[in-house]
Image (cartoon, rainbow, N blue to C red):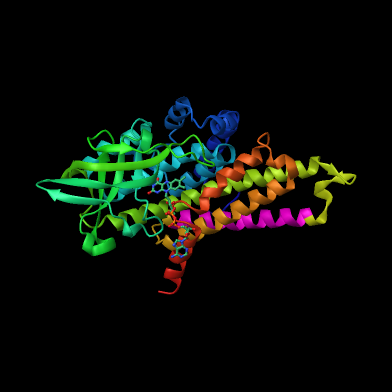
Amino acid sequence: MNSPFFTEDHEDIRDMARDFAEKALAPVAADIDKNDKFPQELVDTMAEMGFLGLKIPEEYGGSGMDMRSYVCVMEEIAKKCVTATLYISSANSLSTAPIIMAGTEEQRKKYLPGVASGEGMISFGLTEPNAGSDAASLTTKAVKDGDDYILNGRKCFITFAPIARYTTIYAKTSPEKGAKGITAFMVDMKAPGVSCGKPEEKMGQRGVPVSDVILDDVRVSKDCILGEVDLGFINAMKTLSVGRVGVAAMSLGIAQEALDLAVEYTKARVQFGKPLAKNQALRFMMSDMETKLNAARMLTYNAAWMMDNKQDATKAASMAKYYAAEAAFEIVNKSLQLHGGYGYSKEYEIERLYRDVRVNSIYEGSSQVQQMVIAGKLLK
Ligand SMILES: Cc1cc2nc3c(=O)[nH]c(=O)nc-3n(C[C@H](O)[C@H](O)[C@H](O)COP(=O)(O)OP(=O)(O)OC[C@H]3O[C@@H](n4cnc5c(N)ncnc54)[C@H](O)[C@@H]3O)c2cc1C
């Protein structure tokens, strides 16, 4: 692909990811969805190929690549197995961005190599039952006790929590200060008082466990604080900006696959004596799908480019996530429509894509939250 956003190195990593997705992931994606289980061998292979440590600096076991390399990998892998992208996005954004941004040298050495090797997953614990879009209203508390802190509260919808080694927990250290009284703590999932709720039975993106994390008088030392006390919310918001570009890239991959399936199907399926693809109404539908996909692509690549060039990409990341997630859902939905009744059958890949894409406009900040961020920057 010729694009002003990418170098040959980016295209090489894209080719590597595409090859892996086609050969290793496509044949097992339906089984992963059906069994709600992702094979450990594939996690190991992705770690060996460097996908889990793509953005982790080399001195901590990663490859130290940029945001555009990450986008290329996410897009290609999402075409064949959306679940696999969650292992990659967790490792390269929600798990590690808080530590790369705010961790001490010791914390980076302690936590990052395990994520790159796939042996020490970290989950991101922000959302609570009564604090979703309004994340700053979280009520998990961390109370100082000598040199330690005692954590109490409940997080929900925490991706990978049941198999994570650590979770970054955002807790109120100064409840009276609202968003400016939240601190990030690295919590050992085996520590006394930490437990997980039962894994959610999810509609899509299956093969990744998601559950509540319950904190019952959990004692953590002050060495587990990430960054400064009371400044954790900024850390969470910056992490989510990186995550949003990842979700946008994943949306591109899903949408491209859905469009490719629509083209193939409508050329082959004959009704009223001619292929569906010969109907102008359907050709126009597909030209809209192609146009929206390419618009989403430009927003996503641009946000990644801005991040690589150290520009403030907060609005760009929100626009990319908002538009790409909404466009991907529309494209997948239309592709399913073009498949007719067969699209509604689990025999066809589009049925899985329809379930997989639905959450992209909900998690890591819903579409409405992205609109709030965009409007906030526009109308400041
Ligand atoms: C599969 C999955 C994985 C997840 N993984 C993680 C994770 O690893 N870590 C983590 O911390 N969280 C995680 N989440 C949580 C996710 O980020 C939240 O679900 C999301 O932020 C929305 O919060 P909510 O579900 O409480 O919805 P709510 O905040 O209750 O919102 C409900 C609806 O109202 C809209 N809305 C809310 N307020 C407004 C407003 N002021 N104006 C207009 N519209 C509004 C929202 O956009 C949404 O459509 C995950 C969620 C899912 C489903």
Camera sees residue 1:
no
Which one is nearer the viewer's eye here, 114 or 186? 186
**Residue in view at x 63 percent, y 54 percent:** 330
**Residue in view at x 49 percent, y 34 percent:** 207
- The answer to whether residue 50 is above or below residue 370 is above
**Residue in view at x 50 percent, y 36 percent:** 84
In percent of width and height, residue 118 lies at 38, 32
Instruction: Name the residue at the bottom extreme.
Output: 379
- The answer to whether residue 166 is above or below residue 226 is above
Q: Looking at the figure, which quarter contains the C terminus?
A: bottom left
In percent of width and height, residue 216 lies at 24, 42
**Residue in view at x 45 percent, y 30 percent:** 43
In percent of width and height, residue 270 lies at 84, 42
Q: How many marks?
A: 0
Point out the stretch of residues depicted in magenta.
Answer: 282-306
Residue 302 forms part of the magenta stretch:
yes
Q: Quadrant of ligand 1?
A: bottom left
- The answer to whether residue 177 is above or below residue 85 is below
Residue 220 forms part of the magenta stretch:
no
User: Picture quarter containing residue 106?
Assistant: top left
- The answer to whether residue 261 is above or below residue 190 is below
